[in-house]
């Protein structure tokens, strides 16, 4: 069994052909999918998806790009939306993105902390996005984790070796995507090789970041096999080992039976 720990099935590229996407995933042993929320509108579509497909689960959260539009969404709202639905098993996608700065940095930070508070109260994982914001992301996570049982998943990791080490020091799980299959990912591969397999998950972030040999095309959960193959080469273990460990890690992190 394989788990795609981060995809966006509500996006039109996948949503408009979802039956076929799910069938292709299952054919390739991708038996469970976690579809990630980015906005309240996204969440509405996710709830429809969860109702239709038994093997798909979801999250509730506001992507850092969108935080300027949803300043009113605080920890209470996040808590209540998550608590309402049994198949909503995490908070996110949240975090910091200082590469594009679609939202003001301070607004992003405030929203990030509100998400963390809700995740701590719910005792569910928080799915974190971080781009060009390693220092601030780490400092916020470290500070907020001090007095809580916060469970952290750093999604689509592309950071430095130092950042990876700091995340491991606060017991984060780290998810890798199709980016590790790209030709220019040599440094990233070296960093991933240093991360214990007990801390790794896999994802597609579909419909984005299609792995080689599909780069430039619409990504989908079935393509995760190429990420698993590359990860097995990086870690110098079998693909079956990667499948087993990343699935086990997902189950442990998300308290998933």
Image (cartoon, rainbow, N blue to C red):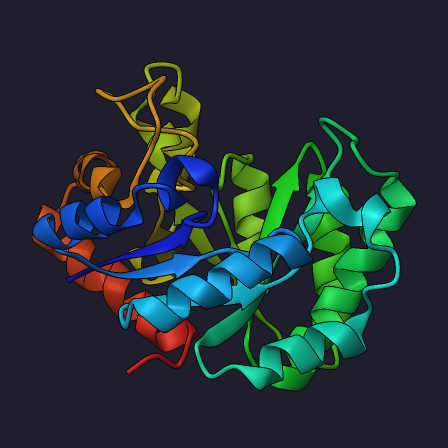
Q: Nearer the viewer, residue 110 or 56?
A: 56
Q: Is residue 253 above or below residue 183?
A: below
Give x and y (percent) for residue 193. Answer: 33, 40
Can I make out residue 235 in this image? no
Whether residue 154 sits left or right of residue 212 in the image: it is right
In which quadrant will I find the C terminus? bottom left
Q: Quadrant of residue 255?
A: bottom left
In which quadrant will I find the N terminus? bottom left
Question: In the image, what residue occupies the spot 22% across and 34% down?
Answer: 230
Q: Is residue 18 above or below residue 190?
A: below
Give x and y (percent) for residue 13. Answer: 40, 35
Question: In the image, what residue occupies the spot 19% across and 49% down?
Answer: 25
Question: In the image, what residue occupies the spot 64% across and 42% down?
Answer: 130
Whether residue 48 sits left or right of residue 63 in the image: it is left
Can I make out residue 30 in this image? yes
Question: In the image, what residue occupies the spot 59% across and 84% down?
Answer: 84
Q: Nearer the viewer, residue 227 or 45?
A: 45
């Amino acid at each position: 069994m394989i788990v795609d720990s981060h995809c966006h099935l509500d996006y039109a590229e996948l949503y408009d052909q979802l039956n076929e996407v799910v069938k292709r995933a299952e054919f390739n042993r991708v038996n469970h999918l976690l579809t990630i929320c980015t906005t309240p509108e996204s969440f509405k579509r996710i709830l429809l998806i969860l109702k239709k497909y038994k093997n798909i689960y979801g999250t509730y959260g506001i992507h850092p790009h969108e935080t300027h539009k949803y300043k009113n969404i605080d920890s209470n709202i996040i808590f209540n939306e998550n608590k309402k639905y049994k198949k909503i098993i995490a908070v996110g996608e949240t975090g910091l993105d200082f590469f594009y700065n679609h939202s003001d940095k301070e607004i992003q930070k405030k929203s990030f902390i509100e998400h963390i508070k809700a995740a701590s109260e719910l005792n569910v994982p928080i799915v974190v996005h971080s781009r060009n914001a390693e220092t601030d992301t780490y400092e916020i996570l470290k500070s907020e984790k001090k007095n809580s049982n916060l469970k952290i998943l750093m999604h689509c990791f592309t950071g430095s070796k130092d950042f990876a080490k700091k995340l491991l020091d606060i017991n984060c799980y780290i998810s890798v995507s199709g980016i590790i299959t790209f030709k220019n990912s040599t440094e990233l591969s070296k960093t991933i090789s240093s991360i214990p397999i007990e801390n790794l998950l896999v994802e597609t972030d579909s419909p984005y970041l299609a792995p080689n040999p599909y780069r430039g095309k619409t990504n989908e959960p079935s393509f995760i096999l190429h990420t698993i193959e590359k990860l097995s080469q990086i870690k110098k273990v079998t693909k079956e080992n990667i499948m087993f460990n990343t699935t086990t890690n997902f189950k442990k992190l998300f308290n998933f039976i």
